[in-house]
Image (tube, rainbow, N blue to C red):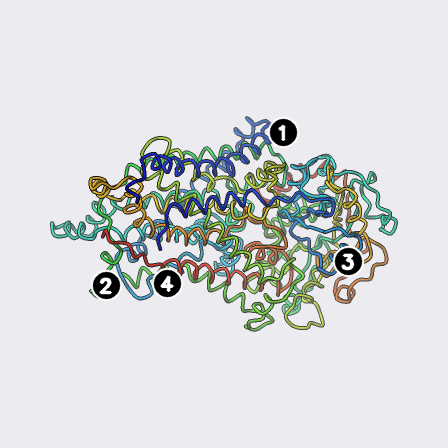
Amino acid sequence: MTISYKAVLALFALALALAGCGGNGGSPTDVVLVTHDSFVVPKSVRQEFERKTGLRWKILQSGDAGEALTRALLTAGNPEGDVFFGVDNNLLSRAVAGKVFDTYTPPALKQVDSAYDLDSKHHVVPVDHSEVCVVYDRSWFASRHVAPPRHLTDLALPRYRGLTVVENPATSTPGLAFMLATIARLGESSWKGYWQKLRANGVLVTDGWEEAYNARFTAGSPSGKSPIVVSYSTDPAAAVYFADRKLSRSPVGVVRDTCFRQVEFAGVLRGARNPSGARKLIDFMLGRRFQAGMPLTMFVLPTRRAVPLPPVFTRFAPAISHPLELPAAEIGANRDHWVKEWTDTVIH
Amino acid sequence: MDRHRDPLSARAWRAAAFGIPLAFLLFFFLFPLAKIVARGLGSGGGESAWSVLTDASTRDVLWFTIWQAFASTALTVVVALPAAYVLGRYAFPGRSVVRAVVTVPFVLPTVVVALAFLAILPQGLQRGWAAILVAHVFFNVAVVVRVVGTFWARLDPRVTDAAATLGAGPWRRFREVTLPLLAPALTAAAAIVFLFSFTSFGIVLILGGPSYSTLETEIYDQAVRVFDLRAAAVLSLVQLLCVGLAVATTTRLEGRLAVRGQLRAEHDVLRRPRTLGERVVVVASLGGLALFLGLPLAALVERSLAVGGGHNLDAYRALMQPTASLLATPWEAILNSLVYATAATVIAIAVGGLAAFAIARSRRGRTRALDGLLMLPLGASAVMLGFGFVITFDRSPIDFRSAPWIVPVAQALVAIPFVVRIVVPTLRAIDERQREAAALLGAPPSRVWREIDLPIAVRALAVAAGFAFAISLGEFGATVFLARPDRPTLPVAIFRFLSRPGELNAAEADALAVVLMALTALAVFLVERIRVRRLGWF
């Protein structure tokens, strides 16, 4: 193999030429959804939107929920697309303060359960919700004849010593939700005392959900050692749906007393190139078809009323009717110093 | 016809060799990075820049970042040298297989490797600085084995033989003859390992646990979690300063250490192990390394097969099916990765190759500066660079944010330093007398370059191409930011699977990681097979 420098130069010229083309701005026939990594939509649902509106639906994923929001904040006013989906109630205040969104009140909002409609000015509208809960490995407890935990405070009992994994609220969305759950349940005065007890009881902290669930949790990894983990109320359904065999009972159980509500919102990006297309997409995301498809693709639950759930959900995932909640404004005002206090209590 | 080419074209050629890499780096690296740092420093809220700098926790983070990077580098060199020696001195069956396989850990996504380590490390050792160091060695051993091993295989063995004749023992021969000759390649490899360890992210997050952080993880937290862009910008500047210092030191060292001597063809140097002792050395060095690298990799393979209570190929079969976890069918990610990595390799070899020639041929300050500048992307915060891309290439005519070619360009930024590191020491070691002799015989500079430098460089370029391809295949930090969701690469797809619950998702992630391993090994192996015919000088 010999390379002449002409070939090298030619290749570079080619690279530069390629640099000249490309770069899609998104024309009025496109509508671009900016979202996080966890967003999935089935092809058929995507095609239905395109058929109905004559628009091409493009998707741009930009990292996890935190990264995607940071990107949206950095590009506020000159956004990368038309609609942003994926900001949750814990970070909503930051997005609104960063002037990421234009307001829009879609007609379909009337069909949405008002419990999720947390932004009265409608910069954003609620698209899905999920509950962050403590979940456990059923067979681990059954085979040892130990009763699984039933309440938040149980986790501090000697019986569950060294069995629990939680995510760091400074770096993980479910971790943050669980910290907020302890504040919502135990109150401003005693939540830190609870965490001190958890720490003394050998709680393991990971930086991300991936490590907690896929490496530490006994039902998530053969080498896992912890049968209790902070995750989602839909996990029992996911564990059945993504199992290699047919299961008649989910291997994962949920401690209902620990669940904290997470709502994910979508809004029209300020400075969108196709604002009318953006509004159509938001209408569609609140529509029956999209809402009914979300459980089996993103493992989140619809905010629209009376949307039937897939059988694997009705059969295996418990409905959490009264999860713990905190007002979005209170979270916005206190989040950062709570996280700092948590770090001082649990890590240092 | 070369004889008729006038000297101007030689000068133009030299200007291009210097200017094109510089322009590439300024436009695709320094420009976006400067923009995001300026934006961060100018943003309101949060602490002042000075209080971030003087904060006690900043000092702790900086101290840990520095010492763990030094320790990781030293350990990596110690672990890798025996294998580099064996590969640089002995011919044996399967030698190129060994060189290919050793590269595999280097390209695996850190989160996959960290999870594999958790599966095999004993409970007590899973968390803390020791686990971080071991994982850094695991990742980076390939750099030292390959860069030093390749260079070692070109050193004339007669020099050490002569020292032996004069009565020098093996240790003294190594210390006083071999080590000085190896020094440039060793410095180059150590510099790369240092930068990688210095900016380590996924390993520190998972194997360090929440109580360990490096500058890189701290920048990420400030930028993404706290959204304190000013703190992130200040820390990025601190990081860049450290990296700049490290780079300046090593490029200076490397230039000073270069020993001009006759490099020889590999087949003249390598010989079969003759005595029993030599065979034991070969088997022991390679066996030890195989055990160290093989255990976590074997754990990964095992996990990809463990589905539904038994061992089977279900996860691999599932790769052919559409999945609810991804906007593309998993096997398409394999295809995307190959296309992106090929493009990135072409760019990296073109830009990095040009730079290497400019750097090796001149000792002037400006080429040394170019050398250092090209190394910087290895030490810059991936997340800040990603955000920089987003706010820089956002307006016509440079609205590249969603252009597909931006992915290989970003991957090439990471691969170029490797091309330069691998090619420059080889070029520098070319005996100037060869060039002088050619010039004396009437060859114009362009011809000297083509007839002398290039044939020698081709082998090094081939090695560099293998590395560049492997790095692009495994690149995650920038790719996840820029790749379109319907065109995910292998590491991106692996990450998507890992971020969902369910047995099959975890197994498909492991299966894709095994595919990534296999592709890397195959690619590097094929590049190794490229036989260079024109080695007539040796």
- For marks 1 and 2, the one nearer the N-term is 1
Q: Is disc 2 placed on a helix, strand or loop?
A: loop
Name the mark nearer the viewer: 3 or 4. Answer: 3
In space, the residues marked 3 and 4 are separated at their CA atoms by 51 Å
In space, the residues marked 1 and 2 are separated at their CA atoms by 64 Å
Examine the rendered structure and indicate whether residue B533 appears above or below residue B382.
below
Identify the disc placed on residue B43: 1
Q: Which chain does tag 1 point to?
A: B
Mark 2 — residue?
B273
Position of residue A240 measured from the top left corner of the image (x, y, whole percent): 69, 67
Position of residue B319 measured from the top left corner of the image (x, y, whole percent): 59, 65
Identify the disc placed on residue B97: 4
Identify the disc placed on residue A48: 3
Report the residue at 35% width, 38% height from top. Answer: B359
Q: Quadrant of the N terminus of chain B?
A: top left
**Amino acid type, label 3:** Glu
Taking B20 as reference, is B259 left or right?
A: left
Position of residue B13 measured from the top left corner of the image (x, y, whole percent): 37, 38
Examine the rendered structure and indicate whether residue B380 appears above or below residue A262.
above
Q: Which chain does tag 3 point to?
A: A
Name the mark nearer the viewer: 1 or 3. Answer: 3
Report the residue at 39% width, 52% height from top. Answer: B141
Name the mark nearer the viewer: 4 or 2. Answer: 4
Residue contact at pointers 2 and 3, CB within 8 angstroms = no
